[in-house]
Amino acid sequence: MADLSLVLWAAIPPLLLLGYYYCRIPFAPPLPRLLMFFIFGAISGILALSLELIFESVVNSIVDWQQSKRCLTASPCASTLFGITLRQLVEIGPIEEGCKLAAVVLPIYYLRPRYRLLHSSVFLLTIAVALGFTAEENWIYLFHGTASILDRTIGTPVHAMFSAPWGYALGMYMSSKTELNRDKKFIIRAWLNSVICHALVNVLSSAWRYPLPLRFLSYGLFPFLLWMFGRLEQLLRKVQGKPSIILISGYTPQQRYWHRSLVLFALVLGGNAIFGLFLLARIVSPLNPSKFFDPDILWFILTRFLLNLFFGVLAWGIYRYLRHTARRRYF
């Protein structure tokens, strides 16, 4: 019964998110086919884990990984950051994004002679595979007790955000009548972009374990995730045939620089407001509900919640100001 509960907690959040995107994309593939790709994504997650274990076994048999990190960097802090970054760029990012890409491409080439695939359909199938990969990864973490249900639920859309660029590029290639070589190059560039973003998020998410001052890198995680979520939404609007959301609309270089600064400021405020609420939920989740009404604890919860809510509302206000400014200029 406990194992079934873990499977449900691992699978239900990704399935709910998949249903949300299914409702948003017009002319979506049939739901059974979408669930089939979700299962392919889970299988690709198992394959990726196996390949990572094989890769580490082979590398450790050839070179002393820890010793190589110490030789290539001078300080312990730099060694920690360099080793984690190198592992993410060489092993984790390429293997996981490669397995997800294979889980999309191979079934599509089988289905392609029978069905006409739209750009939006390929993009949605990519999201389905990424969320299936997430479900498998959730189960691994929950089964081994290395992450909480809250952590994994909040991280549900992350793999979809990683894979969105190459999913969009693959959709352009599959729906194109010409299939030029430049379209293939676009897929490769988008896939490399996904690998780099994947590696960067994993490095930032583990930054709280670093010694100071590298620990402060963790404050860049949620702003970067917020930016990737915005990129996913922009790509989704493109496959829906909707115009992109314009935030930088200045005519002069000074105006564009000011707007870019506001976008960055809004990402920092909004991302860290979400980060603050996430930390607050982590702190209070182990407490007995009856303790919430203790004056000291209640005051702590209210002050932290209102502070992060203030920063979040401020970030939203900057976003709405930029949207309003762009509408006045272009419409």
Image (cartoon, rainbow, N blue to C red):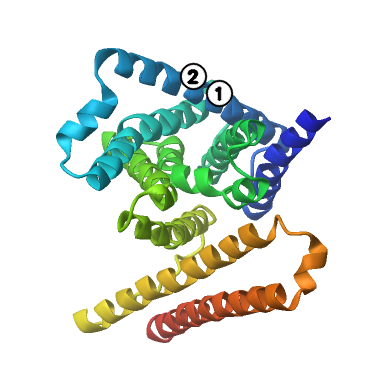
In this view, 151 is above or below 42? below
Q: Is residue 230 left or right of residue 195?
A: right
* Residue 106 circle label: none
The structure residue drawn at horizontal position 66% and vertical position 73%, both measured from the top left corner, is: 301
Which residue bears the numbered disc 2?
A: 50
**Secondary structure state at the residue bearing disc 1:** helix
Query: Viewer-proximal residue, 150 or 16?
Result: 150
Q: Is residue 38 left or right of residue 271?
A: right
The structure residue drawn at horizontal position 34% and vertical position 51%, both measured from the top left corner, is: 211
Q: Amino acid at mark 1?
A: Ile
The reply to whether the C-beta atoms of the residues labelled 2 and 1 are less than 8 Å apart is yes
Q: Is residue 133 left or right of residue 67?
A: right
**Label 1 environment density (alpha carbons within 10 Å; few <14, some 14–19, many ≥20):** some
Percent of width and height locating residue 186:
31, 41
The structure residue drawn at horizontal position 35% and vertical position 29%, both measured from the top left corner, is: 91
Q: CA distance from mark 2 to mark 1?
A: 6 Å
Q: Amino acid at mark 2?
A: Ser
Percent of width and height locating residue 270:
49, 71
* Residue 46 circle label: 1
Percent of width and height locating residue 233:
51, 58
